[in-house]
Structure formats: structure tokens, C-alpha cells
Amino acid sequence: MYIFVKNSQLMSVSDNLKKIKSTLPPAVKLVAVSKNHPSEIISEAYRAGQMAFGENKVQELVQKQAQLPADIEWHLIGHLQTNKVKYIAPFIGMIQSVDSLKLLKEINKEALKNNRTINCLLQFHIATEDTKFGLNQEEAELLLQSDDYKSLNNVAICGVMGMATFTDDLVMVRNEFRNLKNIFDSLKAKYFNKNNNFKEISMGMSDDYKIAVEEFSTLVRIGTAVFGERQYV
Ligand SMILES: *Cc1c(COP(=O)(O)O)cnc(C)c1O
């Protein structure tokens, strides 16, 4: 059993999962963010019933996918370069970090080669702090209105994803989540009214998922609260 220490208490992955799940409404999906944690620990979470895992690097994801049970649902949550799409296209469950039409077209191309449809989320830049990745609403609308987008038959846009500012200011965090929910509602009404795929609002991490759920998150991405602190070597 994988055990770590937090606030001088012993914690286990399966206890953590149980605890987090008990606080989530049943309709909110938990993606366990396993980046920088070894496959054995993912295995333990899997044996405890966790099926969806999130990784942010293609190379690490591909290695783990090969070592672990084939029915794991893998989510890519980090920035994706177009030249790496081909490595994950055969198996990826959802790409949460789509931030350009160019990337979406490449995902479509590789999905077609693999004779499948790949689920995607549009990533939005909602944080007040200056981070590199994510669309704003205007950019997303241009993407969704383009003829190029309309011709893509092997990608399914299933909703939106965003990360709040890394801050203790919980009012700011809440407002950023509200902003993402407003973007979701607006895009849903304008572009996905009759499309049942478009239903996910991916927001909330270890330190802010309770606020995210209050602000109508449908999918939380939780790493540290499940697996403990990440070791970067
Ligand atoms: C690492 C990461 C998470 C999980 O963060 P924790 O604070 O460890 O829960 C969630 N989303 C993204 C995009 C990440 O990169």
C-alpha cells in the first residue's frame, strides 16, 4: 500500500480517493492527476476503483499507458504540441488542453488514421495571472465558426477546461470559475445547443475543487490530495 505523510498523519491513496469521492456530488467526475507519480501507485488507485487518470506530458503518458491496464481512461491535461498528437491518438480518452484550431485539425487527422473519434475540451485562459496557454472567448468563437472546424468529423468537443490563478485569494478563484461557467453557457447556447457531447466544465484542483464544484464544475482534476506531493527529480 502506498502511504505518505501529511501533517504528520499517514495517508493512503485508497483512503484519499474514498474521502474525496464522499465530498463530490455523484455527477462530478474525478480525474486523478498522476503526473510525476510511478505506475505502481496508479495501479493501486486503479485497484481501488479509480478509472480516469490525468497526465500532462506525452512521453510519460505513453510509457504509463503501456504498463497499465488497457481499460484506464487517460486524460491529457498539459500543453500538447502538434507533432506529438500521433503518439497518444490510438488510446487517449480525452484531450483537455485544446487551445488552437491547428491542434484540433491535427487531432482530427490522427483520430481518422486510428478510425476513432477523440474527445476534446477547449482550454480557456481564465487566470488573472499571466500564463501562456488557453483561449479567450473570442478566439474560441472564431474557431467554432470556421469552415475548417465544421469539416472535422473525428473530434468531439465535450466542453471547456480552465485553471484558476495560483493564489490564496479565494474570491478571485471563485470569480475565475464563474467566468469559465459563463463561457461554457454562452458557447453551449450559441454553438452546441443540440449537441449532447458538450457538457463538461473541467475546473478544480486539490486546493480549490470545493469552490469549483460550488460553481458548477462537472469534472475535477486532483493530484496532490490523492497521491501526495509530487517528487521532481
Ligand atoms: C497538476 C495539475 C492538476 C492537479 O494539481 P493538484 O494541485 O496536484 O491537484 C490539475 N490540472 C492541471 C492542468 C495540472 O497540470
Image: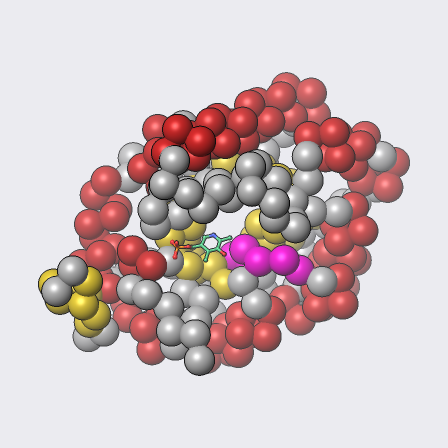
Residue 88 image point, x, y percent: 63, 67
- Quadrant of ligand 1: it is bottom left
| Quarter of the figure with residue 35 | bottom left
Magenta highlight on residue 119: no
Which residue is located at x 50 percent, y 31 percent? 176
Judge whether residue 209 can be spotted in this image: yes
Residue 150 image point, x, y percent: 81, 37
Q: Is residue 225 left or right of 142 when viewed as pictured? A: left
Q: Is residue 15 above or below residue 64?
A: above
Which residue is located at x 37 percent, y 58 percent? 223
Magenta highlight on residue 76: yes
Q: Nearer the viewer, residue 28 or 102?
A: 102
Q: Magenta residues?
A: 73-80
Q: Is residue 125 above or below residue 179?
A: below
The C terminus appears in which quarter of the rendering?
bottom left
Which residue is located at x 37 percent, y 34 percent? 170
| Quarter of the figure with residue 112 | bottom right
Q: Nearer the viewer, residue 181 or 150?
A: 181
| Quarter of the figure with residue 44 | bottom left
Q: Name, please, the residue furthest toward the right.
A: 147
Q: Is residue 79 left or right of 44 when viewed as pictured? A: right
Q: Is residue 119 above or below residue 85?
A: above
Q: Is residue 138 left or right of 43 when viewed as pictured? A: right
Q: Name, please, the residue furthest toward the left.
A: 9
Judge whether residue 158 can be spotted in this image: no
Which residue is located at x 54 percent, y 62 percent? 56
Residue 17 image point, x, y percent: 25, 55
Q: Is residue 220 left or right of 7 when viewed as pictured? A: right
Q: Is residue 58 above or below residue 74?
A: below
